Image (spheres, rainbow, N blue to C red):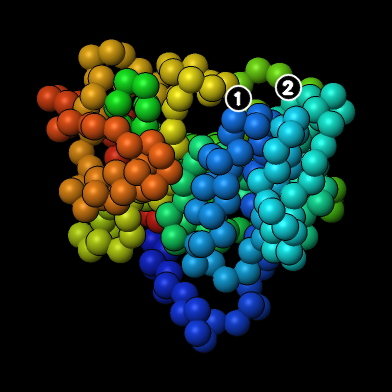
């Protein structure tokens, strides 16, 4: 189903006046390799710098030697775990969910970047016992130097925000035995089915710019990704797009993306939009449409 009327764009938070009387959101980051610790630190900084005022981060670290945090404090906690006891991404995330204090859970990867207002916007359209997903995400291939807007009208599962508890008060948990890629897809389908909210991230709403569209999150593809390039990029996995922007990205958004990439150590030289390249089609329906 869809909401009868569009949801108004939420007011941006004021750090000086807004109180912490909003639900606590727990971000969960899993890291399993020493080589990815610096990536994880960048991802944590991106997450914790968001404008949503009530948040914490749980880091579940199965790397053999290195830690992400130099010290622990209340809103950033790191748990070192034995990879033999936690052999899958699902088991590792479930450890984070178990340790979380938040009412809402937002997993993020060590090679993701969140826009300043990403969490605020997703929480603004939440519904009881529903998960919230973005419908667009910027994806960057650091090997082929390709940038595209990845779209999925049903919502992109690896952007999922969800309530920690199900309706029966049990924890919403991942499948701890799943070893192939696609754990987010399986989790959303099993735990929520059709109970999800799609946050429409088109650059404009009713002709008025109000949010940085597909830049809400940026995901990177590189040599150590678990997913295949074809799964990650869909129609833009082909070599004909090497070195190109695929799809229409406004100049100010592209400037923001390249700045973020540089700070994350992913500087690449990406050229003009590919001739004839289009995204899968702009999602229709109101902001926060429920399906």
Residue 13 bears which disc, if any?
A: none
Q: Is residue 244 above or below residue 94?
A: above
Query: Could you tell whether 68 is left or right of 289 in the image?
Result: right
Q: Nearer the viewer, residue 285 or 131?
A: 131
Q: Residue at x 84, y 31 (%)?
A: 82
Please determine whether, in this image, residue 177 is positioned above or below residue 59. Answer: above
Disc 2 residue crowd, few under 14, some 14–19, many 20+, Cα 10 Å:
some
Please tell me which residue is depicted at 38% across the width and 67% down the height of the picture: 9
Measuring 33% from the left and 37% from the top, which residue is drawn there?
267
Q: In which quarter of the image is residue 150?
A: top left
Q: Quadrant of residue 21?
A: bottom right
Viewer-closest of 256 and 93: 256
Labels 1 and 2 touching (C-beta < 8 A): yes
State the residue position of label 2: 178
Residue 189 in sight: no
Q: Which residue is painted at 64% across and 52% down in the image?
A: 27
Pointer 1 residue = 182
Q: Which residue lies furthest to the left in this view?
A: 275
Coordinates of residue 209 in the picture (x, y in percent): 25, 61
Which x, y percent locates residue 273?
17, 32
Q: Tag 2's secondary structure?
A: loop
Q: Would you call the spot at circle 1 few (<14 residues within 10 Å), some (14-19), or many (20 or more)? A: some
- Corner quadrant of residue 63: top right
Q: Where is residue 57 in the image (x, y as percent from the top left)?
A: 67, 55
- Above or below — where is 211 with respect to 249? below
Gap between marks 1 and 2, in whole Å? 9 Å
């Amino acid at each position: 189903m869809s909401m009868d009327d569009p949801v108004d764009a939420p007011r941006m938070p004021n750090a000086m006046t807004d109180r912490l009387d909003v639900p606590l959101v727990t971000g969960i980051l899993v890291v399993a390799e020493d080589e990815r610790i610096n990536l994880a630190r960048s991802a944590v900084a991106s997450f914790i710098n968001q404008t949503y005022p009530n948040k914490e981060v749980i880091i579940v670290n199965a790397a053999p030697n290195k830690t992400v945090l130099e010290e622990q404090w209340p809103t950033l906690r790191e748990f070192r775990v034995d990879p033999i006891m936690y052999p899958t991404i699902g088991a590792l995330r479930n450890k984070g969910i178990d340790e979380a204090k938040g009412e809402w859970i937002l997993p993020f990867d060590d090679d993701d970047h969140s826009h300043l207002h990403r969490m605020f916007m997703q929480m603004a359209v939440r519904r009881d016992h529903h998960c919230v997903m973005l419908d667009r995400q910027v994806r960057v291939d650091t090997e082929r130097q390709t940038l595209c807007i990845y779209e999925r009208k049903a919502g992109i599962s690896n952007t999922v925000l969800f309530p920690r508890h199900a309706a029966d008060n049990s924890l919403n948990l991942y499948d701890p035995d799943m070893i192939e890629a696609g754990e987010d897809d399986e989790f959303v389908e099993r735990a929520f089915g059709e109970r999800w909210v799609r946050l429409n991230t088109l650059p404009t709403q009713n002709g008025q710019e109000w949010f940085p569209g597909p830049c809400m999150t940026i995901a990177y593809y590189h040599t150590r990704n678990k997913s295949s390039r074809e799964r990650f990029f869909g129609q833009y996995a082909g070599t004909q797009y090497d070195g190109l922007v695929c799809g229409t990205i406004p100049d100010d958004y592209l400037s923001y993306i390249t700045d973020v990439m540089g700070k994350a150590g992913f500087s690449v030289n990406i050229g003009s939009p590919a001739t004839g390249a289009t995204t899968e089609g702009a999602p229709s329906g109101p902001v926060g449409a429920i399906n």
